């Protein structure tokens, strides 16, 4: 009988504990980039593959990141991106190059291969609140353009594209809007550089 009482007490304990520790659900807001569509240009003749974005440690997470001091950053646990930034940006850059008609955009590793390979890396993505009267959204991307041919591959260029866009308010939505604007500038500048380099 004593053993039975002990077993019943053990079985009831998790239920009591779970009831007493129940907390209200944390509400989060998800955001997606809204990068302006590319302007159509003359059709590029070369095929282009865009490798998946990689990201530095400060730019890889879904939670929005705020710079609040020279060496201090804070994550926003309640506001985040819909998916990790590299995942969102890989498709966005491929769409941009297709819309701009910079070339025939292909998936990396397709049987047809490609003439050019783009290797992108996101290195900065944060809202700069060091001066809250003038908040800015900072984004920086390293883009490497590689030419591939029968004789092998050669790097055409590696460039860092960086934008710091004034925000309309101190808010998560304003940060994402400004990042989207900055990424639009970066993608347009890179597309122009790619066209010049590819001839």
Image (spheres, helix red, strand yellow):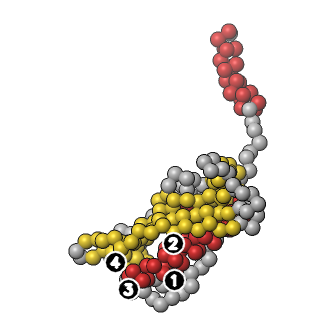
**Which of the 4 image quadrants contains residue 89?**
bottom right
| Mark 4 to mark 1 CA distance (whole Å) | 17 Å
Is 28 in front, or is 194? 194
Q: Which residue is mark 4?
A: 115
Q: Which mark is residue 100?
A: 1
**Residue 63's spot in the image, x, y percent?**
63, 53
The C terminus sits in image quarter: bottom left
Q: Residue furthest left?
A: 151
The N terminus sits in image quarter: top right
| Mark 2 to mark 1 CA distance (whole Å) | 11 Å
| Mark 3 to mark 1 CA distance (whole Å) | 15 Å
What residue is at 51 percent from the left and 88 percent from the top? 41
Q: Which residue is mark 3?
A: 199
SS under mark 2: helix
What residue is at 61 percent from the left and 63 percent from the top? 138
Give the crowd class for mark 3: few <14, some 14-19, many >=20 residues within 10 Å.
Answer: few
Residue 168 makes an appearance in the image: yes
Q: Which residue is mark 2?
A: 93
On screen, residue 57 versus residue 118, left or right, reads: right
**Which of the 4 image quadrants contains residue 117?**
bottom left
- Looking at marks 4 and 3 on the same chain, the residue that comes earlier in the sequence is marked by 4
| Mark 4 to mark 3 CA distance (whole Å) | 12 Å
On screen, residue 18 versus residue 82, left or right, reads: right
Q: Residue furthest top?
A: 2
Contact, CB < 8 Å: mark 3 with mark 1? no
**Residue 149's spot in the image, x, y percent?**
27, 76
Observer-side mark, 3 or 1, equals 3
Observer-side mark, 3 or 2, equals 3
SS under mark 3: loop
């Amino acid at each position: 009988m004593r053993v039975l009482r002990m077993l019943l007490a053990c079985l009831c304990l998790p239920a009591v504990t779970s009831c007493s520790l129940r907390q209200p659900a944390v509400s989060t807001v998800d955001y997606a980039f809204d990068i302006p569509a590319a302007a159509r240009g003359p059709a590029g003749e070369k095929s282009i593959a865009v490798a998946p974005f990689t990201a530095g440690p400060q730019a890889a997470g879904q939670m929005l990141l705020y710079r609040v001091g020279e060496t201090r950053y804070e994550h926003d646990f309640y506001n985040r991106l819909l998916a990790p930034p590299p995942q969102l940006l890989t498709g966005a850059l491929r769409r941009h190059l297709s819309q701009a008609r910079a070339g025939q955009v292909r998936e990396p590793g397709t049987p047809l291969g490609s003439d050019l390979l783009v290797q992108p890396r996101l290195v900065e993505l944060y809202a700069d609140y060091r001066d809250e009267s003038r908040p800015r959204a900072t984004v920086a991307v390293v883009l490497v353009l590689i030419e591939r041919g029968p004789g092998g591959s050669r790097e055409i260029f590696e460039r860092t594209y960086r934008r710091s866009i004034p925000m309309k308010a101190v808010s998560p939505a304003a940060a994402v809007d400004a990042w989207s604007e900055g990424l639009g500038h970066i993608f347009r500048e890179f597309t122009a550089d790619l066209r010049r380099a590819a001839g």
